[in-house]
Amino acid sequence: MSTEVASKPIKTSEPLFSKKNMRLLSDPLNENNPITVQVLGICSALAVTAQVKPAFIMALAVTFVTAASNVFISLLRNLIPGNIRIIVQLTIVATMVILVDLVLKAYVYDVSKQLSVFVGLIITNCIIMGRLEAFAMGNKPWASFLDGIGNGLGYAAILIIVAIMREILGSGTLLGYQVVPQFMYDAGFANNNLMVVPAGALFAVGIIIWVQRAQNKYYETE
Amino acid sequence: MEFMDYFNTFIRSIFIENMIFAYFLGMCSYLAVSKNVKTAVGLGAAVIFVLTLTAPLNWLIKSAFLNEGSLEWISASLADVDLSFLSYIMYIAVIASAVQLVEMVVEKVSPALYGALGIFLPLIAVNCSILGGSLFMAQREYNLGETVAFSLGSGIGWFLAIVAIAAIREKIKYSDVPKPLRGLGITFIITGLMGIAFMSFSGIKL
Amino acid sequence: MQRDSKVYSIVFATVICLVCGVLLAAVNEATKDDYKTNLRVEKKSNILAAVKYPLAGKTGAEIEKIYDEVIAATVINSKGEEVEGDAFSIALKAEKKKPVEERSLPLFVYANETGEKFYILPMRGNGLWGPIWGYISLKQDLNTIYGVVFDHETETPGLGAEITKPWFQEQFEGKSSLNGEKVDIVVLKGKGNQLNEHSVDGISGATITGNGVNSMLAEDLNAYQNYFKKLN
C-alpha cells in the first residue's frame, strides 16, 4: 500500500511518451517478444501464416483486441474480485472479439471473410490473457494500452516474418504476386509444399527462435 | 452404421485432425508443461476430461438457446430470435465455469485426484484446444453423438501429443543441441517432425 | 463491501454480463441488416460471376439491381418437375442433408443480350477441413461448361484454397460435363496430366480438396439431369 502512495506523484508527472513508456512499446518487439521469448500465442501464429495477407489481418486484429482489453481490464482492475477474475477477463476479451467481428461483417465484409476462421482463435490467443494477467491487472490504463500495442506489434513482427518465409518458399509468391522469377524455376527451384503445411510453420518458428537467441545470447538452461 | 460414423469421427480426431499437429491448438500449454512425462500425463488427462465435458455441454446450449429459432420451445413468440452472435462468449463462459466447478468437485470428492490434477485445472480454461473443440463442433454442425466422439478423440489426440513430446524432451536433455536452440527452439522443430509423421495419417479414408 | 465476498462476486459478475450482453445485443441489432445485405450481395455476385458477368467496381446496390434484371430463377426436384419455392433463399446446406429425392433444387437462368440462355447450378460439398461450395454455368446445350465459381471456408491457403483462383476455375471453361448420360468432369491429382474434355489439372498437395470438388460436381449436377432431359 505504502509503495503505491509513494509512487503515485511520480507517475502522474510522467510524460505520455516517457522513456519508460516507450520501452513498453519496444521491448516486446525483440528482447521480450511474446512469441519467441514469452511463448504465448503460438496457436494462431502457426495457423494463419501460410500466406502474408491473412497473417497481416490477424496481426492487426490481435493488436487491437490486446490493446482494447488491456485498457478495459486496467480500468476495472481495482473492482474485479480475485476469485472470478479469469472469467471476467475472458468475458471482456470475448466481447471485444465479437464486437470486432460484427463491425467487420457489416462494414468491411471482404476483410471479415478473410478473418472469419481466425476470429475464434483470437479469444484463445494466450497473448491477450497473458498480458491481462501479467500487466493490466496491476498497471494504469495508458501504460496498459502501450503494453497491449507493443505486444501486438511484437506478435505481428514474428507472424509476418514467418508468413514471408512460408509464402516465398512454399508458393513462390508474396501477397499473391509471383516474386520468384521463372529462371529460378528453370534452374531447379521448386515450390516447397512442406512450407505450406502445418509442419513448415513449426520449422520456421524454430529457426527464427534459433537466430534471435543466438543474437541476444539468451540461452535456456534445462 | 451410425456407430461406425461415430467411430470414424473419433479416429479422425485423434490422428488425422490432431489438435496439435493439424491445428496447433493448445500449443501454449503444450510447450510450457512438457518438460517431463509425469506432469504431461496429468495435464493431458485433465484436457481429455474437460474437453469431453464442455463440448457436448456447449452443444446443448447452442441447440437449446443460440441457434436461430431455437428459443421456440420457451414461447412461440421467440421463434425469430437469433442469439448466435453470443456463441463465443457463451462457450468461453461455460468452459471457465466448468473448469472452476470441476476443480471444486474434484477437491471435495477425491483429494488424491485433486493432488494430481489440481495445479493443471486453472491452466485449462485458457487452453486453446478446449475452445477450439467447441468452435469446431459448431462450425461443422456435428450432432450430439458426433460431438461426444469428436471431443473425446481430440482430447486423446492432445494427450498423445503432449506425452510424446515430453518423453522426447526428457531424452533430449542428454543431447548436444546448439545452445540457442535449446529448450523452445528444438521443441518446435521436433514438433514439426512429429507433425510430418502424423500427416501420413491424412491419406487414410474413413 | 469486501472485494472477495461471495455477494460482491455475484453482483460484479451479473453487472459485467449485463453490460456486455446489452452492448453486444445493441451492436448486433445495429449491424444485422448491413450484414444480411452483404451476404445477399455476395451470393448474387457469385451467381453473376458464374456466367462471367463483369462486376468490377459495381456497388452492392448495383449488383442487386443487375441480378434482378438478368437472372430468372426456378425451383425443381430431382424427378425434373418444377416445384414451388423461392430459389434464392434455399439453403443448400440444409437441402444436402435430405435424400436426393426430397431436395428442392434451385436453378438460375441467365439470358444475355442475344437471348442465349445459360443455366447456373449451385453446388456444395466438403473439402479437407470444412465446406466448399460454388456455382457452375452451362451453355444452352446443357452440357458445355461456360464458367465456374468456387469458394470455401477453411481450406489451406496456398493449397486447397487455390480452388478460388482464376487459373483453377478457368480450366473448366469449355469442358463437357456429360459423358453419355452421367455427369463426368474430374479434377485430376496434381498438375501436368494428360487432359481430355472431361478433366482438369488438380492442385498438387490438395488432393482431398480436389476429390471434394469432384464429388460435389458429380452429385449436384446429376440431380438436375432429369429436368434437363425435359428441356431438350
Image (tube, coloured by chain):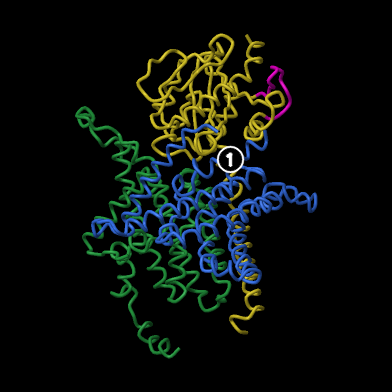
Chain colours: A green, B blue, C yellow
Image location (x, y in percent) of residue B136: 56, 47
Label 1 belongs to which residue? Answer: B9
In the rendered image, residue A12, in percent from the top left (x then y), is placed at: 38, 82
Image: magenta residue range: C74-86
Q: Residues within 10 Å of mark 1 (few under 14, many from 20)?
A: many
Q: Residue at x 63, y 19 (%)?
A: C224
Image quadrant occupied by the C terminus of chain A: bottom left
**Residue found at x 58% / y 68%:** B114
- The image quadrant that residue C220 belongs to is top right
Q: Is residue B74 above or below residue B141?
A: below
Q: What chain does mark 1 sit on?
A: B
Left or right, residue C160 beside residue A36: right
Query: Where the N terminus of chain A falls, by quadrant?
Result: bottom left
Question: From this viewpoint, is residue C34 visible?
Answer: no
Residue A51 falls in which quadrant of the image? top left
Please state the horizontal and vertical placement of residue A87, each as a whole percent of the image: 57, 67
